[in-house]
Image (cartoon, rainbow, N blue to C red):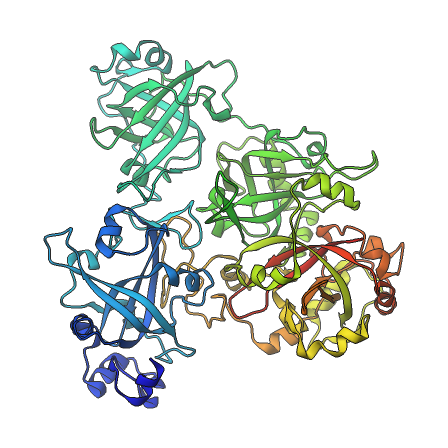
Amino acid sequence: MQDRVESGKSDRIGPILPDSARSCKSCNLRDFLAEKMNCNTLVDLKKCLRRAELQEKELLAGPFVVLKIERYLTDPQHTSQTGLDTVYIDVYQLTVADILHKLKVVVDPKISKDIQNRQLREGCSLKFTKCTLRYDETSLSGSNIVIVHSINIETKPCLSVLPSEMADLRWCPDCAAKQTKDLPLTSSRGYFLNLWSSTEMTGPQWKLAGEEAKSVGAVTAEDIYQVKEIARNWTELQIVNPRMVVRVICKFRLLHYAKPSKLGMWPFQANFTVCDETGVCNLVLWNALCTEYYQRLQEGSVIMIRRFTVKKSYYSNGRGAPSPENLQYYDVDINLNPHHPQSEIQILATSAVPDNIHLPDLEYNFVTRRQLGFMPDNYICDVVGCVTYVGRYERDSCTNKAGLDSGGFWIRRWLHLRDASSEKTIIIEMFRAAESVIAPQVKPGVVLVCRHMKVINNTSYLTRSTSQRQVYITSTINTQLSVRVNGEKNLRPGSAISDVLVWSQSHEGKQEVEHSMLKGYFSYPCVPVQLTALQDMYTDLKIISSDDWKRELTALAYRQHKCLFVQAVMVSAKLIHSPKHVTPKTSSRKRRRKAGKASHVPCKTEVVVVDPEIHALADQMESLGIGEPHQLVNTFPTPYSHAHWPGLQQQLMFPSGELSPEEPQGQGTIGHSSDTVGQSLDSTGDTSESSERILEREMPECYILTWKGLNSNILLNTIWRPTGDRCGRSSSMLELLCMSHPSIRWLSYPSQCLSDLPTILRSATQCMGHRYLLVLDCFRHSHEDNQEVVLKQAYRL
């Protein structure tokens, strides 16, 4: 193929832009290029595809700019329309553009790895090296679909400037009507999945807001049936079409039951727990009603419903939802359907509820940080606190019932909250499904209320009664978040929410916010110090051989996290620190202020060779992981700055998959975040930071330890940072490596109470000849950077 292209014998279509056009910054760039090139590329693309197929020729089309990447699930209709492999369940469609028109294409599932690695992303340039044209024989419209089988991703954009007019480009004149709609190009689906998460749906169909009714009209209290009446007489009320007025007291995660083997435009089910003064029951939204009401209905919402069906509850225990005191739970499901019958739903303002109808208020089960240490494992509670740390998003692979990788990901991040009861923080493992809508509002300083959280104690591997419990809380299927502010109505003085709001405005609360952190590595809880306890914790401990190191690390997708266990011996230790090292006596907050005022503090590195024989051959051996100081910029947390929050927020969020030239879009998107808006982008899609800015930042002290496997000649660079409390007891790396570090210390910037780092470095030679079992946290920032490998624990064998 390359020979044919170089010899000029291939059918090349598309504008090959001259340098003058590439550097043109005129607002009439499109007209300028159209006049100079006199081309209409995408209009002729389909004709050329058909001709190339008939003549059995390969085709090189492009370059094109990727405007949008969308994802949905396959079904039998998609298979018949495209003829693609049915092994894959995800379908990716691209909206590409040249200087005149835009077009939607479906990509072969084999290209999906380039999307999940962020190599193929919005704004990049590509050429189609192999594509086919298929007529949609399932439709009478005579439409056809371009299927791209292989691509070449350009290292530089085909346009040096992406003008805002590209968002308003016309569709190809011969495009079918479905091309112009915000719908999947193939299949029977009516929605898109989030590019990174299978628990979030995107698209304008999902309504996020709506007006509340101010009255119930001509409906009287006598027309309204109660939960108790419905539950006891529901078999006799099927033809009456009664009305009900209830309050939502619990909202569960949206159930997405689409399968590749079944058709379905809206395969959704949304479960709620509702109540009135007579009892509690379940309410279920089906299919298209979920797109209209799921995001609008929140805990505390009041609704009036009619034309519903009642059945015996599928979940006899109410899925563990809490019920108000003195109210009986009835195991019936009130089902609301878009048709047969077409249910009526009206969201009411609180003032619209008739006076003689009494609905219970929401009840909270707040637990303070001081009380959290005494709660039993798996206890369900509510917490409220001021946010002091917002972690980066990490994706963990989902497994199916057989324990195998399903191809999907769970997305989570760590949050820290503070309340007035303790100096310790409330550590929260928050999964993306629980915070998809509210995620952009979560930042240091806001007061966050988390309902229906589960307590995790990790007491199974505590070795002594004096061992510190590493308690944290995690989100559940019915976790709901809300941001609270001062001056809210119906906020009782002396309540848990009010107390935290008052504390957040105090001097202590403001100091905590001033020293809060963002992003960076954080892992919790710590692994046990004893190897036997680790084996009890991981009953199916899988140790990766050195021959598989490269395969495991290179297979990581964008922002994927994986914990690996490997056996290795140390080759060398590199200390990375600032020559203007601050003495341990200086408080962490003073050092933090000094670090913020520092200007151009370069990093200094010192190396101690542990295994001279292997180190001498290091240049000839393959190396994995981060090896240079400048690559650590994303590993350590960043101090929070209110002035720089917009840029920092873009780095926290996932890219949206859509190229937005000006203002962020997303009013019709669940969990939509456009962190590619109007910014210069690096390979991760995040806002890039200039090299001068990186050099001016004081790099936290840490070590890069290089290891070698027992069989292969691959070197592994791991990031290691001893904690202050451990360093005070010993200055030997041989001993410090075998002590579990509290991950909370990673958020101290610079680290607290470190002893003489060069002394620890020189002691690395004592590790020679010792074999270690390493516990590694691996994370991939982008497809171009080396993977981040943090040494969490080392067990000497």
* Residue 243 can be seen, yes or no: yes
* Quadrant location, the N terminus: bottom left
Above or below, 401 against 652 in this view is: above
Above or below, 256 against 10 in this view is: above
Above or below, 698 against 468 in this view is: below
Residue drawn 24% across and 20% down? 219
Residue 108 at x, y percent in the picture? 33, 61
Give the quarter of the image for residue 733: bottom right
From the viewer's perspective, tell me whether residue 130 is left or right of residue 280: left
Above or below, 359 against 751 in this view is: above
Depth check: give the residue in front, 35 or 97.
Answer: 97
From the viewer's perspective, tell me whether residue 614 is left or right of residue 522: right
Q: Residue furthest front?
A: 711
Residue drawn 63% across and 70% down? 631
From the viewer's perspective, tell me whether residue 643 is left or right of residue 472: left
Residue 135 at x, y percent in the picture? 16, 60
Residue drawn 29% across and 16% down? 224
